[in-house]
Image (cartoon, rainbow, N blue to C red):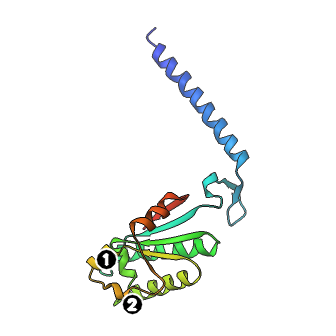
Amino acid sequence: MRYTAYVIGIVVAAVLAVAATVQVSQQQQHTSGHTSGDGVGTIPMHPISHGGSTIVVHITSGDPKDARHMLSAEMGVRMALAMQQQGKDVIVFLDSYGTMLAPRNPTDDRLKALNSDLQQFAMQGGRVIVCPHCYQVLGNKAEDLTPGFEWAGPGKMSKVWSGNVIVIDY
């Protein structure tokens, strides 16, 4: 009698484990596998990762005085370019300090390089959307926004967030 709760717990755990195994097995049958670059093994892909998703790379970092900010901003831009090169629908959303990447003539050389990469990204069909409030609070002027970059607005961002979206934050 004193082990009843223990036995019931083991039985419930076993049933849940079997159910999870069956569910994973069914998902693997319905989704394609992804072979790693070295050809070793496959990783089952979740159905949301197959076409139709917009990838939003959300960059909130870009303070040139902070090494971690610059690393995050660089990684965000690199991720957006890599996803675009794979044929994905990619939007870069710059807000907070990420808007430091948006002026057409940034004062810092690292920001200039990232801005140049974002211009290339936009010329190849990507969208760069910038929070106007954050941009201006950080001392930037609206007329200095890089050509081809877009202002965020409630209607625009509502449309972006209402779709099938995967967000990657930097």
Whole-number angstrom distance, CA of label 1 to CA of label 2 = 14 Å
Residue 38: image x %, image y %? Answer: 70, 66
Label 1 vs 2, first from the N-terminus: 1
Name the image quarter holding residue 133. bottom left
Residue 101: image x %, image y %? Answer: 39, 81
Q: Is residue 112 left or right of residue 83?
A: left
- Between residue 104 and residue 113, name the one nearer to us: 104
Residue at image mark 2: 109
Name the image quarter holding residue 95. bottom left
- Between residue 93 and residue 20, name the one nearer to us: 93
Dot 1: element: loop
Name the image quarter holding residue 120. bottom right
Q: Residues within 10 Å of mark 1 (few under 14, many from 20)?
A: few
- Between residue 65 and residue 111, name the one nearer to us: 111
Residue at image mark 1: 66
> Hey, what amino acid is under mark 2?
Asp
Give the residue displayed 40% in from the left and 82% down from the top: 102
Above or below — where is 61 with respect to 52? below
Dot 2: element: helix
> Hey, what amino acid is under mark 1?
Asp
